[in-house]
Image (tube, rainbow, N blue to C red):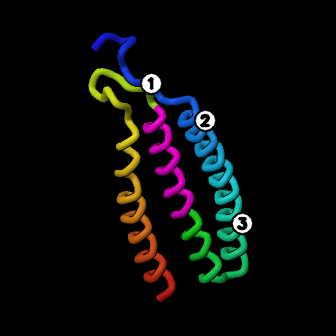
Amino acid sequence: MPPDSRPRLLEGHRRKLTLAKRVTAIGMAVCASLASAKLLVGWMAHSTAVFADGLENIGDLFGSGLVLYALYVASKPPDKEHPYGHGRHSLLYPKGQDQARGRLQARKLWLLS
């Protein structure tokens, strides 16, 4: 397929992906500061509940990182192997996010018991 005939990302779609990446990055920064504050307060106050909540925020941060990576992959332009773009790759990352959250919840239950 000649390079000129490949489909391109529409400008509106590109703007939405850029906005989604920016919002996800801001959310990750807020989540990281919240997680560090909860971990510090939980450790200093010897509160396992607050410390475990900080660990849950770290899990949210990890999940947001997966979303950010999925948005990065989805925004790649079409190439020879993916002539219609990489948008479908973003469907795989919620499964990994769910598995990671399940493991973190099991760890949280173990910590609180």
What kind of residue is marked 1?
Answer: Arg
The quarter of the image holding the N terminus is top left
The span from disc 1 to disc 2 (Cα, nearest Å) is 13 Å
Residue 8 - label: 1
Between 10 and 22, the residue placed more toward the observer is: 10
**Magenta part of the chain:** 59-75
Give the mark toward the camera: 1 or 3: 1
Q: Is residue 89 above or below residue 51?
A: above
Local secondary structure at mark 3: helix
Local crowd size for mark 1, using a 10 Å CA cut-off: few (<14), some (14–19), many (≥20): some
Local secondary structure at mark 2: helix
Residue 72 - label: none
Residue 37 - label: 3
What kind of residue is marked 3?
Answer: Ala
The span from disc 3 to disc 2 (Cα, nearest Å) is 33 Å
The span from disc 1 to disc 3 (Cα, nearest Å) is 43 Å
Residue at image location 39% in from the left, 24% down from the top: 7
For marks 3 and 2, the one nearer the N-term is 2
**Residue linked to disc 2:** 15
5 displayed left or right of 48 = left
77 displayed left or right of 83 = right
Q: Is residue 28 magenta?
A: no
Residue 61: quarter of image: bottom right
For marks 1 and 3, the one nearer the N-term is 1
- Which residue, as the protein is rendered here, is positioned at the far bottom? 113
Q: Is residue 3 above or below residue 98?
A: above
18 displayed left or right of 85 = right
